[in-house]
């Protein structure tokens, strides 16, 4: 039984074409300009104002309803517990999906749209890249070729961060990652101070851990999420996008002598493509099949992309 098949009567999701989904925008205003979209989108991601209108305005409206419902429930709990001094904790949105599928663009566009609601909420964005173990440790433990797999992250730091956010702590710090040096930046942090909404983006954020046999509580990252989004596409499409992005980076960012991948810019096009295919097959494809794709059905909403890198179908979990 495929619960993500629109014809499956036991599916927990409702399915909408992009055109159907766009109708749910209602009167949600477009608050982004073309120049801003160009700044927010990632390399090789063709998202434009039309895509924002088709997909992201309806999503913004849906999230607004969820945030409002969460705030109402919080106020009701204040009354229930007679605890008026309790601080409302941030609404956390998790965004998962494979490398090269467009998670970063989705996260950045949503951050801007949500921050421009009439209520002007404070919205922060954190990625899990900073919680990767430093390269020095990955090399020591022979994990460099598993970078991005669940065991390459500092899970304890991830849980402490999200627990701090969900406990309404002040000035919770997240480590910062450099895509230039391909490593965590020592001593550099992003400070998150009680936002109204936190977007938490990463390939494995919906990954469950092993359940304890003794029934003790073992938190998963997703336990802290109020809403989870998975960016989806056919495996072969993601493969194409990954190779295209790698070859584009070879002509741009990799040319920087300080880049971890600078050596690839010196190779012939054929040799560079062979390297990219190897990285895809031996690391990213394995991670997708073993760890990322199995978490798809844990999402509240799935954005499924087509060959043009634009969303073709939306699956929303039923209430």
Image (cartoon, rainbow, N blue to C red):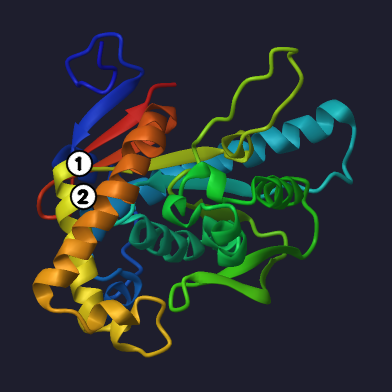
Q: Are marks 1 and 2 in contact (CB under 8 Å)?
A: yes
Q: Which residue is mark 1?
A: 235
**197 above or below 188?**
above
Confirm whether residue 222 shows in the render: yes
Q: Quadrant of the N terminus?
A: top left
Give the left or right position of residue 219, taking residue 149 as reference. Answer: right
Q: Which residue is mark 2?
A: 238
Query: Percent x, y for residue 294?
Result: 38, 29
Q: Which mark is residue 65?
A: none
Query: Percent x, y for residue 201?
Result: 48, 53
| Residue plotted at (15% across, 48% down) | 237
**272 above or below 138?**
below
**207 above or below 255?**
above
Give the left or right position of residue 80, taking residue 176 as reference. Answer: right
Element on which disc 2 rests: helix
| Residue plotted at (71% across, 37% down) | 74
Q: Nearer the viewer, residue 51 or 278?
A: 278
Element on which disc 1 rests: helix
């Amino acid at each position: 039984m495929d619960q993500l098949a629109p014809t499956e009567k036991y599916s927990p999701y409702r399915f909408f074409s992009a055109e159907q989904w766009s109708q749910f925008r209602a009167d949600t205003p477009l608050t982004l300009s073309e120049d801003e979209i160009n700044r927010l989108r990632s390399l090789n991601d063709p998202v434009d104002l039309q895509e924002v209108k088709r997909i992201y305005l309806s999503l913004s409206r849906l999230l607004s309803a969820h945030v409002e419902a969460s705030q109402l429930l919080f106020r009701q709990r204040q009354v229930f517990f007679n605890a008026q001094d309790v601080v409302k904790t941030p609404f956390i949105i998790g965004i998962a999906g494979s490398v090269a599928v467009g998670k970063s663009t989705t996260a950045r566009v949503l951050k801007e749209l949500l921050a421009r609601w009439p209520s002007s909420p404070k919205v922060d964005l954190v990625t899990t890249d900073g919680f990767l173990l430093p390269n020095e440790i990955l090399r020591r433990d022979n994990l460099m070729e598993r970078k991005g797999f669940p065991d390459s992250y500092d899970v304890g730091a991830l849980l402490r961060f999200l627990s701090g956010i969900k406990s309404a702590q002040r000035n919770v710090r997240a480590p910062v990652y450099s895509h230039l040096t391909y490593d965590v930046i020592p001593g550099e942090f992003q400070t998150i101070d009680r936002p109204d909404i936190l977007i938490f983006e990463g390939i494995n954020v919906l990954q469950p851990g092993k359940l304890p046999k003794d029934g003790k509580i073992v938190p998963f990252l997703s336990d802290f999420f109020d809403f989870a989004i998975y960016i989806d596409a056919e495996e072969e499409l993601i493969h194409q996008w990954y190779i295209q992005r790698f070859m584009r980076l070879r002509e741009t960012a990799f040319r920087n002598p300080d880049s971890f991948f600078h050596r690839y810019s010196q190779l012939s096009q054929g040799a560079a493509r062979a390297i990219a295919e190897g990285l895809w097959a031996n690391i990213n494809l394995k991670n997708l099949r073993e760890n990322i794709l199995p978490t798809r059905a844990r999402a509240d909403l799935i954005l499924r992309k087509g060959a043009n890198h634009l969303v073709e179908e939306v699956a929303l979990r039923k209430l």
